[in-house]
Image (tube, rainbow, N blue to C red):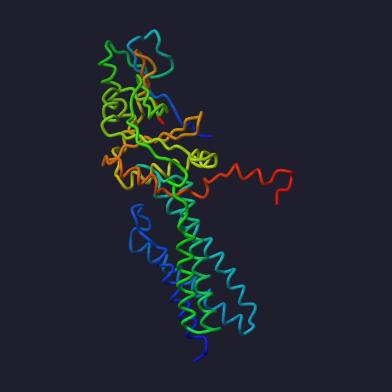
Amino acid sequence: MSDYVYPILFGIVCGVISRMLMLRTDYRQYPTYLHGKIIHIALGFIASALGAIAVPALIQEEYTAITFLTVAASQFREVRNMERNTLAQLDQYELVSRGNTYIEGIAIAFESRNYLVIFTSMLTTLAYVLFHIIVGIIVAIGCMFLSKLLMGGGKLKDIVDIEYVEPHFKKEGLYVDNIYIMNIGLPQRQEEVLKYGMGFILKPKNFNSRSTIANLGQRQAILHDIHTALGVYRDSGTPALVPLAKRDLDDGRVGVFVLPQEKNIEKAIDIIGNTPTLENAIRMPTKRKKHEGGNIS
Amino acid sequence: MSIEKMILAVITTNPKKAPSGLAVFHCDTQEEMYKIGGNLEAILDGIAHSISDEIMIIVKH
């Protein structure tokens, strides 16, 4: 038996474990079922195998083995496509859709998690081969911790202050604080909206976050997250009962109007705060100052 | 380019102010207007918006 069998197996196991740690099912409910999880664990296994095998191959001076990793890259780009297609198809039948920005964010996360698995298995195998299994274990724990840290991402509560405001009507116009949401003509609908509706004001903490929460995809993600957690008071055929988030053009605040089944203010504020800031929505206009003077690099 | 919003019907208590070229429902009272508006909203899957006290439109979003 080759000297590298145990290091490779060790690397693969560490990679798969790290993939499983990154595969969490929470209130956002994705991936929900066993089949979805099996797909991702299987891909994680392939990723970790590629990472683990690359190390002994390179030590044996089989430099062409590095081309293996290009196979991995195209394989995982395919993962991103798969996730995007599945979620986009499902989104059509959601009462409150995720939105393309959120879907793209999830798809990118799934692809990048596989790369983290490759790095984990590569480094642990390397540590095992060069030093000892104990060093390998330490490196594996370090990598998993790092992966967890990297996958965390930002939360909305870091960039905005959230405040509850009772929605109200001025004639037929629905308002959250002074932000106009929509026109609802029928008195019966207005009563329903006031009975079940909740309003929140998201106040950006700085100029960068003002642009981030202005992104339509980010706003849709907030609405989706609230309604996954608290339920939604709407159905097909009741288009007037629609959750919306609108912007105050003067100061960049966003008024969020939602129709949850469970009217729990604290929980809702908590959920809005825990909504991920989508990396595709993040804007940093203030960073531009660094490039002044024509040097863009 | 697809049309995103479209007026499906108009309900009014003042026929003089109602637009032409659309399905217009004439009503005698505001209560009747709300009742027809509620029905049309459910049937057409659009939202009943109030333009003024006399005119409502059903819009498909």
Q: At which x and y percent is residue B47? A: 36, 28
Query: What residue is shown at x 60% (from left), y 42% (from top)?
Result: A286
The residue lying toward the viewer, choosing from A223 and A166, is A166
Name of the residue lying farthest toward the top: B16
Query: What residue is shown at x 40% (from left), y 13% (from top)?
Result: B18
The residue lying toward the viewer, choosing from A174 and A289, is A289
Query: What residue is shown at x 55% (from left), y 68% (from top)?
Result: A72
Q: For this view, does A175 lie left or right of residue A72?
A: left
Q: For this view, does B21 lie left or right of residue B25?
A: right
Query: What residue is shown at x 45% (from left), y 42% (from top)?
Result: A160
Look at the picture and state if A16 lies above or below B30: below
Look at the picture and state if A106 lies above or below A171: below
Look at the picture and state if A124 lies above or below A232: below
Q: Quadrant of residue A57?
A: bottom right
Q: At which x and y percent is residue A202? A: 42, 38
Count of marks overlaid on the render:
0
Name of the residue lying farthest toward the bottom: A1
Q: For this view, does A222 lie left or right of residue B28?
A: right
Look at the picture and state if A243 lies above or below A154: above
Q: Quadrant of residue A200?
A: top left
Q: At which x and y percent is residue A139? A: 49, 75
